Amino acid sequence: MPKTLEVAIDISAPPEQVWAVISDLKRMSEFSPQCVRMQPIGTPKAGTWTINVNRDGKKYWPTTSRIVRYEPNQAFAFRINENRSVWSYTLEPTETGTRLTERRDVPNGTTWISRKGIDAALGGEQLFEELLVRGMNETLGKVKTAVEASA
C-alpha cells in the first residue's frame, strides 16, 4: 500500500514570490526530475485539467490530472487520474520567508494497473517511492534556487 510521502524546504522569500513560481504549472518540468511537461487546459484553478508527460530514464508515460485545490499564496493540489495519487504544495509564512511542503498522498490506494506498472517497469513500490522522495527533494531545491535568484 503506497504511503504518504512529504518533504519541505525553507525559502528566503515571501509566499507571494514562491507562489508565482510554484503555481506556474508549465514550469514544473524545470523543477521535477520526473515531469517532462505539465500543460493546464485553461487557466489553473480548482477543477482545471492538465495533460502531463513523465519519465524515468528512457521510460516515458502520459498522465492526466485535475486541480483539486487552488488557494493563491497558500496551496494547490492535483489528483492524477491514472493512479489516484494527490500531489500538493503548501506554503507557510516563516520569520525568514516561506516553508514549502510537497506531499504525495494516496488516500484511497492506487489502481491495480499502476501497481503492476510500478512493479514491472519501475523497480517495485519501495524503490519507486524512494526515487519519488529523492525527486521531491530535488524539485524543492530547484524551486528554492529559482525563487531566491529572482528575489
Image: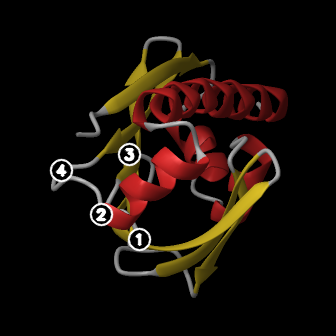
How far apart marks 4 and 2 lie (CA) works out to 12 Å
Q: Earlier in the sequence, mark 1 or mark 3?
A: 3
In the rendered image, residue 56, in percent from the top left (x then y), is placed at 71, 47
Single out the residue that lies furthest toward the left: 108
Total residue callouts = 4
**Dot in front, 3 or 2:** 2
Residue 150's label in the rendered image is none
**Dot in front, 3 or 4:** 4
**Dot in front, 4 or 2:** 2
Q: Earlier in the sequence, mark 1 or mark 2?
A: 1
**Residue placed under numbered mark 4 in the picture:** 107
In this rendering, the answer to whether 4 lies above or below 71 is above
Residue 74's label in the rendered image is 3
Q: Amino acid at mark 2?
A: Thr
Residue 82's label in the rendered image is 1
Q: Secondary structure at mark 2?
A: loop
In the rendered image, residue 126, in percent from the top left (x then y), is placed at 42, 28
Q: Nearer the viewer, residue 79 or 17?
A: 79
